[in-house]
Image: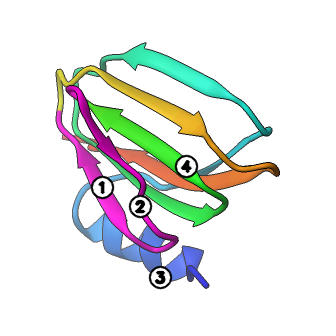
Amino acid sequence: MVDRAAVAEDWRRRGFGCDLWVDPPGQRWEDFVHGVDELVMVVEGRVEFEIDGVVHQPEAGEELLIPAGAVHSVRNLGGGPARWLYGYHAG
């Protein structure tokens, strides 16, 4: 189980925010680009992250960095809601 408070504190020390996102089954977010680094971490569900053409299917608690300027997509592959943390670098 992911300790959201501990993750938020760790990310804050590293200069990132930390918020929870919930996607319904089948939700897809395609081809986003941000001007700052983003951290993501699956809390629950089966989520696929595609970053500059490389597909990742992290386990709950596994952190991924989406670098600034990377084209990325997020897909809920599970049959239920997916919950994942995300945070943008503040500096």
Q: Earlier in the sequence, mark 4 or mark 1?
A: 4
**Circle 2/circle 4 CB separation < 8 Å:** yes
Q: Nearer the viewer, mark 4 or mark 1?
A: 4
Under tag 3, what secondary structure? helix
Q: Residues within 10 Å of mark 3 (few under 14, many from 20)?
A: few
Identify the residue under disc 2. 58
Task: Residue 16 in the image: state x and y as whole percent.
Answer: 32, 53
Left or right: where does residue 12 sit relative to residue 75? Answer: left
- Mark 1 belongs to which amino acid? Leu
Give the Cα distance between marks 1 and 3: 16 Å
Identity of the amino acid at label 3? Ala
Of residues 38 and 52, the one nearer the viewer is 52
Residue at 22 percent of width and 30 percent of height: 36
Dot 2 and dot 1 residues touching (CB under 8 Å): yes
Q: CA distance from mark 3 to mark 2?
A: 19 Å
Indicate whether 15 appears above or below 63. Answer: above
16 drawn magenta: no
The alpha-carbon separation of the residues under discs 2 and 1 comes to: 8 Å
Residue at 82% across / 51% down in the picture? 80
Is 38 above or below relative to 59? above
Under mark 4, the amino acid is: Val
Where disc 1 sits, the SS reads strand
Query: Which of pointers 1 and 3 lies earlier in the amino acid sequence?
Result: 3
Q: On the image, numbered disc 4 is attached to which residue? A: 47
- Pair 3/4: label in front: 4
Mark before the other along the chain sequence, 3 or 2: 3
Can you identify the residue that label 1 sits on?
A: 64
Mark 3 and mark 4 in contact? Answer it, CB < 8 Å.
no
Task: Give the amino acid type for the residue marked by disc 2 in the picture.
Answer: Pro
